[in-house]
Amino acid sequence: MRLRSVSFATWCANHEDSHQAKWCRELYPWDVLEQVDFDQSLLGIPQQIVAPPERFVVTLKERHAGAAGRINWLLHILSPPAGEKKRWSHRSWDNVLQLVASSDGHFITVFAKAKDPSKIILERFFAGTLACDEFVRSIPVSAMLFRSLVSYAAEDIFGSLDRGFPTAAARDGSQAWLPFLSRGRDLWIACAFTEEKAHRIGIKNVGAADQLLVVYSQPTFSRHHRCNAPNVRILSLQEFLSIGSRRALLRYIPQARLLLNHLRDQTLPDHAGESSSALLCQIGQATRSPRIIETSELREARAGLGITISTSSDVAYVCACGNLVNAAMNPKLGLYSKSIELSKDVYSFKSILGRALENAICMNIPDVAIHVAQDGVVYVRVHGLQFSFHAIPRLPQLEEFATSEHNRRQEWSGLRLQPIAPLVLEWARALMSEQLVQQQLR
């Protein structure tokens, strides 16, 4: 016999909305569990369950009576080996679950017999040991980790928030879309895995709350509609993390990079663990050959351009991101030839970079020197490395700075950074990590 009402909606109805395992349970294979035949005569007999496009094997292991007339079932669920494409679309399972039902066959709850597999994945994710395990790489797992990271970072930034929103009624009385986190109508926080979807959420929910933040993981490089409402902020995960404490940034930025790169560690193997000073020496070698730009690096650079600047390493990182995007778009270099089609009018990264430089000028950050030349080139010297950018929009504060006594002249060093943009990004990454550790130890 099949149990009645086996679904995540039923699980939610039977548990408090604040239950800490809610988004872990959401990833359980509900379409499989609702097809299991819970007949005592089938104990120990594998059941083939089809949940398109996957096939699962479910084996009832034990049945015993619980409290208040409930029935406890112990079952093993296994998803067979699949190709990489299928593994990425669907979460893999090889776990023992305990399912509780009422005596009349209504589903009540389900949980892992041992430690919840989702909690194990979360622990390994935040410990930095998840990237070596291909078995867990999937869109559902990525979504769970993404929302977990947004939740922890939001608590660091805003304090305690509600999960979802207590009512589904919009201000005009219509059915409303619900945020991931909220503080009444004052603040709503939503998650969207891609930048394009984040903007769509912003456009559709402009008036839902006084302030709406939509956080995304994957930047979109194709043309798409953008939300420019004053009460809506569309933020990459890196940008969102950077508005919190430096301690939180230190703790979570590696996880943000892992999510950005589909749970694969994309650290350059020949530079892993090297100090910023060692990388800077390598950058200075004039004979270094050009470096091919990977899509993972381009994603990171696009997502990292808008981080909140408060230290010199932030400036170095933003400039390194801008340098890499610039290099990827340079057809003469030919360093990026992957599947993503690049177009200048899609993301206007130089406007973002210009605003970041304005912030750096206003903060007068030590170890950062900026010069706006008469020919329009902007030079940025930070921790011994000079960046140069053409066609930066002359924003008001940049324009004012250009005519001030603080605009101290810089001569171009002659070192071209675009051909070695991935190495420069690695240097900035190391510099940021070192500076964050130093601040944490103070």
Image: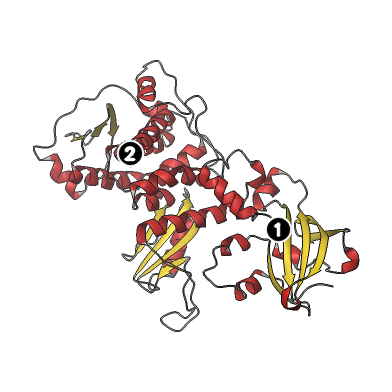
Q: Is residue 291 left or right of residue 305?
A: right
Farthest bottom residue in view: 173
The quarter of the displayed image where residue 156 is located: bottom left
Q: Residues within 10 Å of mark 1 (few under 14, many from 20)?
A: some
Q: Residue at x 78, y 49 (%)?
A: 80
Q: Which residue is mark 1?
A: 113
Q: Secondary structure at mark 2?
A: helix
Q: Residue at x 39, y 32 (%)?
A: 430
> x, y (%) of residue 359?
23, 47
Farthest top residue in view: 287
Numbered badge on residue 441:
2
Residue 42 visible in image = yes
Residue 323 visible in image = no
Q: Secondary structure at mark 1?
A: loop
Mark 2 in CB contact with mark 1 (< 8 angstroms) = no
Does residue 420 sit above or below 226 in this rendering?
above
In this rendered view, identify the residue nearer to me: 184 or 339: 184
First reached walking from the N terminus: tag 2 or tag 1? 1
Q: Residue at x 47, y 68 (%)?
A: 179
Q: How many marks?
A: 2
Does residue 31 sit above or below 344 in this rendering?
below
